Amino acid sequence: MEGEVGRLKKDAVNIAATDMNKINRLFFTGLLMMLLHGGMAGAQTISLAGKWRFQTDAADEGITRKWYSVPLSDEITLPGSMAENLKGDDITLQTKWTGSIYDSSYYFNPRLAKYRQPGNIKIPFWLTPAKHYVGAAWYQREVIIPAGWKGKRIVLELEYAHSETTVWVDQKEAGSQYTFVTAQKYDLSSILKPGRHVITIRIDNRIKAINVGQDSHSLTDHTQGNWNGIVGKIQLTAGPAIVFDDIQVYPDLKNKTARVSVLLKGPDCSGRIRLNAHSFNSGVSQQVPAVSADFEIRNGSGKLEINLPMGDKMQTWDEFDPVLYQLTAVLTTGKAKRAENVQKELSFGMREFKAAGRQFEINGRPVFLRGTVNNCEFPLTGYPAMDEAAWARIFKIAKAHGLNHMRFHSWCPPEAAFIAADKAGFYLQPEGPSWANHGTSIGDNKPIDQFIYDETNRMEKAYGNYASYCMLAYGNEPRGKQVEYLSKFNDYWKNKDSRRLYTGASVGGSWPVIPNNEYMVRGGARGLSWNDRPETIGDYSALIAKFTVPFVAHEMGQYCVFPDFKEIKKYTGVYRAKNFELFEEDLKDHDMADEAERFLMASGKLQALAYKNEIEKALRTPGYSGYQLLSLNDYPGQGTALVGVLNAFWDEKGYISPAEFRRFSNSTVLLARIPKFVYQNDESFAAALEVAHYGKSALQQAVVSWKITNASSRVLASGDFDPKDIPLGNCFSLGKISFALLSVKSAAQLHLEVNIKGTEFANGWDFWVYPAKLPAVKTDIYYCTALDKKAEEILGKGGKVFLDASGKVVKGKEVVQTFQPVFWNTSWFKMRPPHTLGILVEPKAAAFANFPTSFHSDMQWWEIVNNSQVMNLEDFPAGFRPLVQSVDTWFLNRKLAIVYEAKVGEGKLMVSSASLAAEKGPAARQLFYSLQKYMKSDAFDPQFQVDLSVVKDVFLTGSKIVFKTYTRDSPDELKPKPAKP
């Protein structure tokens, strides 16, 4: 028994929750008294996890009818949400969602009518929860307070309650709290005496006077959902009357000390506080000598500061060596007979994260932020993970992709995330829980103005010691008098806490600049210039020239990929991917169900290519300080934004591995400035090599090696540069290479590979070489730009026709195709172009025998497909597949072609809606040559017979399915911008 009591003293007492009406209360009381016997100096805890009585309050009558005084009628399990417990309302067309819907065509489009029927509701704009409920709900259970808790401070902790709570003990109200960022704690010392009590909690998840914005990720149905419940720790804790109300540790690396600020609360007294610390997660164990100081509590509170010398062996925290210390504070009162010992432990790291001009520094060393935006996507539960292991997995995956930074878009994660990030060495930017737009604003004297200060102060108190907490913003893209409000917000925090950097808000490029930001998170200096010929020479220098502080790209990327329908089976929790089910069925209705996987892989390869080129452009920009991808994983809401190389579960999709992604997104990335990717063999390939290096230290005498290989991996040219010391920073030149292409006699795909010998750091680029002169193809093929009478006659007599349909398409004219894929998604942005996700090709088809290609878009296709028309083959025979197929937005799933072949009448027809004229470029000319050679050969044998009238209709009649939005409102990016003064 002594051993058991000792264990309890160390770990605290956790009594598993159970229904008080189903156990012997006398036995339970005796058990509690036995376990708590021994006069523990530390806190003692009763867990309240388990079964609770429950009742929804849709009519909002519970307070008036004093539900806290009567047993509730239903039952629920906590921690958990109502939806997890299958409580709430069924999903219908009348469900009142929390979130903007800019494309309401789902509710009216006749084509989608079957998905609006009872029993088959499938909404396309986000995931579908098992149940939905917005309003008040009541939770109630009995608890027995042991006699040993008499005179102690008793606190009820509700971790991650969503969102406004009101607590009653028996029939006495204990207060109300409203927060999205920290645990709610109620001091029940004065009303919770030893014996049996009933605790009743009313939780209200409606947006009321304090409106953070319906699209804020702290509550929106776009991601985590506006759930009702409590999902973290639910417990009563008893401890001494004196409490460490707050301890904050302020590292001072220059003087190798930690300034410890202590706030005490309790009855008036005096005594002594002893501090000691030790490292606990590094290979070098360090015990910091203890220090002590006197304290005094007067009028219920006391405050003091203690300097803790860390010694010459002090270890610092960063992404490479995230060394942490555990601080133990022990308070002893001066009363000999009734002396009390109070203890508190916390972790901290010795680090300094600051801005030095336009560069971030960690502990005096340059750092480049390689980040992703976390939007609170947790599709199994509908609320964020509350355990450290789940967050450790997320940071491990992010690090495997070369990242070191995470922004939490308009929400703050639970404490488990900070604990995991500290250990992983990740730089975090949590935010206040607000996207103050779309129905709300800041700086207009609304309740949200003070709420943002309250919430960020709660964050500072709860999470301020975590080394990973390096940056803070109010939230996302606000409306209102934002410059004035956010300037004051920045000043407030800069004066209060220097441990992190502050930016007013994370915003797009059209938002006003907050002049006193310590760093910028902005759009404007991002994206690819692929309306012009792709290259890797340009950068964002001109776009960030006006900023004198570090610049971080806001929501970089947003390149879409086709849905992975294999993902549907993963939704085994509170959400179902009804949106994916709708898209999959719609694809089947359009005769392309068998192409789903190929659409995924082909669009994924283009997505990866786009991310590679945009990230490399940032890394080669002088003065650029970081990027925040939107995002590494998918965003399940806002119309379904499939922008991640990972799905919403943080699982890979199969078209790029972490190791492949890390080649261009890492602490050290090799870069090549290449003027173009398509060449003729009478030219030379040239590249200027450089490196962006933000590692643990400079690289000494590094040897950079390069080689050019062909598709058979045969080395055509190679070399090593002289050894060089590579300093920290970017834009460090390594040397130039040049390779004459005369030896490349036929069309070829070549590859430049660069690496730093003895390291994992390598990168590569494909380029294409075509003969400068092609032999004439003597053929009886009739070439035309319209299906004229001669073309019809030739087809009727069994001849061959090549139709250049560029600029002539009517059925499909509304589809805008560029080389880039869909941005975010076409639903949220109301079909803003581009509308396609790249191309799908059968690379082994005889038609491409003289045009080397993969199955997906690549740089040689740019001059062919960029801004080319596509043909909508909606009336073509079932099973018909083009030679070059454009992958359509999954909201419409049109069968789109750039090049197709068909039997027409007795003849054979080849049609291209892309111009393949020689002046388009070497690749277009080479593709035309390859198609001609194919048409001349016996291999030209189209499998499908298509009626001539169907072929002609593509150039006469518009598409049957045309996008129409039924919503007047638009996202901010589509709204008219105010004129600049």
Image: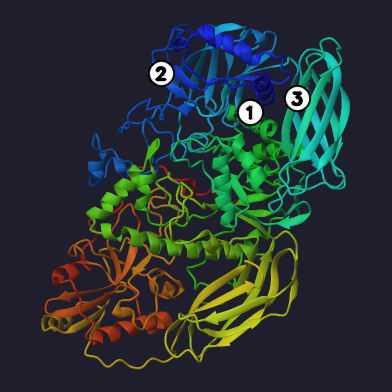
Give the alpha-carbon distance from disc 2 to disc 1, as whole Å.
Answer: 37 Å
Q: Amino acid at mark 3?
A: Gln
Q: Amino acid at mark 1?
A: Gln
The numbered mark, 2 or 1, whose residue comes first in the sequence reads 2
Mark nearer the viewer, 2 or 1: 2
Q: Quadrant of residue 4?
A: top right
The numbered mark, 3 or 2, whose residue comes first in the sequence reads 2
Q: Are marks 2 and 1 in contact (CB under 8 Å)?
A: no
Q: Position of residue 560 (x, y in %)?
A: 43, 56
Q: Position of residue 569 (x, y in %)?
A: 35, 46
Q: Which residue is mark 1?
A: 450
In the foreground, 896 or 487: 896
Label number found at residue 75:
2
Name which residue lies at 34% across and 62% down.
598
Along the horizontal axis of the image, is 865 left or right of 205? left
Against 607, residue 291 (above or below) is above
Mark nearer the viewer, 3 or 2: 3
Name which residue lies at 85% across and 12% down.
335
Residue 115 in view, yes or no = yes
Callout 1 environment at 10 Å: few (<14), some (14 to 19), or many (20+)? Answer: few
Give the alpha-carbon distance from disc 3 to disc 2, as whole Å.
Answer: 38 Å
Against 172, residue 754 (above or below) is below
Mark nearer the viewer, 3 or 1: 3
Q: Quadrant of residue 116?
A: top left
Quadrant showing the N terminus? top right
In the foreground, 883 or 45: 45
Name which residue lies at 70% across and 60% down.
695
Element assignment for label 1: helix
Q: Amino acid at mark 2?
A: Glu
The numbered mark, 3 or 1, whose residue comes first in the sequence reads 3
Q: Which residue is mark 3?
A: 343
Q: What's the image's color scheme?
A: rainbow
